[in-house]
Image (cartoon, rainbow, N blue to C red):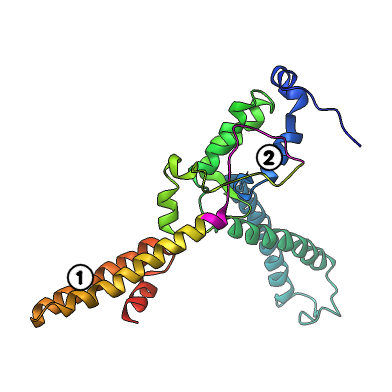
Amino acid sequence: MAFWEPSATEAEVKPWKYIGYQSFSRFVASDNDFFILRRFGALSVQVILALQDQLSCLERDLEAIEERQRAKDAPDVHNGSFREETQDDRKKLLLQARHLLREYNDLVLQHSQLKAHPPVPKKDISSLENWFHNNGNAILEAETEYIKRSSDLFSIVPKFKSPLRVLLEHSRHFRLLKLWQEKNVDSTTRDDKHVHYISDEKIDCFIAIFIMTLGLIMLIAPLWILAFLGGLVQRLGVISTFIGLFVALVSVTTVAKPFESLAAAAA
């Protein structure tokens, strides 16, 4: 069944009607780089601290009951059994604490997981800012303010890229090369001439070939150089230089840790 689609002019005049959240949601869903949300860091911490304080109050009240029950002049009540519990107030405190602890632990774990996400690349934030700009007031301005809180943003599906790729993607010309571009495979997403999709597979393939080529040069070149050198000091100088260059190459082109780079050089 064919659905009516507004003309480009109609969409430009009334983007809030014809574009709106439907098109924006499809745009965000079309690529993981665009799925950026706020973690509400400060607000989450405040809520966690409030729950912590409530639990502290319950803990203090429970300790007060325990001390009162252990007093010398207190009735002889078995304080070492949940089955023979006679203090209703202690039961109520434990029940309240159980529900609050579950909520508290869930929030702490969720917050720690969100904090572990890497910072959102500026280019991904710019992609959303450009969409808001190119589509006028398709989304109410107050509801686009979240994208300006860059330090509080996180990607739902973060991509771990090598330092070399991050460096290359700082260049707008590199990102817009036709070699990487691909068509949007999501037919439900509204076509937008301002949106450019790139293939991660193509870029990763290029980076892999580039690294392999440099690695082979770093391994083969010193062998040929050493073949024409006679002095021991000169040979050691060449070997030391290429080892240093190889460690630098591994550090810059991969996500390897320092000790992993040294291990690769030693191998």
Image quadrant where residue 213 sits: bottom left
| Left/right of residue 128 with respect to residue 13 in the rendered view | left
Compared to residue 138, the image places residue 39 above or below, namely below
Local crowd size for mark 1, using a 10 Å CA cut-off: few (<14), some (14–19), many (≥20): few
| Left/right of residue 175 with respect to residue 26 in the rendered view | left
Compared to residue 190, the image places residue 134 above or below, namely above
Residue 55 visible in this rendered orientation of the protein: yes
In magenta stretch: residue 196: yes
Local crowd size for mark 2, using a 10 Å CA cut-off: few (<14), some (14–19), many (≥20): many
The N terminus lies in quadrant: top right
Q: Magenta region, mostly helix, strand or loop? A: loop
Residue 206 locus on image (x, y percent) = 47, 58
Residue 263 locus on image (x, y percent) = 36, 78
In magenta stretch: residue 209: no
Which mark sits nearer the N-terminus, 1 or 2?
A: 2
Image quadrant where residue 59 sits: bottom right
Q: Amino acid at mark 1?
A: Thr
Compared to residue 52, the image places residue 133 above or below, namely above
User: What number of labels is visible?
Assistant: 2
Q: Along the line of sight, which residue is nearer the eye, 60 or 105?
A: 105
Query: How far is disc 1 from disc 2 in space, using C-alphas?
Result: 49 Å
Q: Along the line of sight, which residue is nearer the eye, 266 or 77?
A: 266
Range of residues picked out in magenta:
188-202
Residue designated by label 2: 27
Circle 1 sits in a helix, a strand or a loop, which is it? helix
Residue designated by label 1: 241
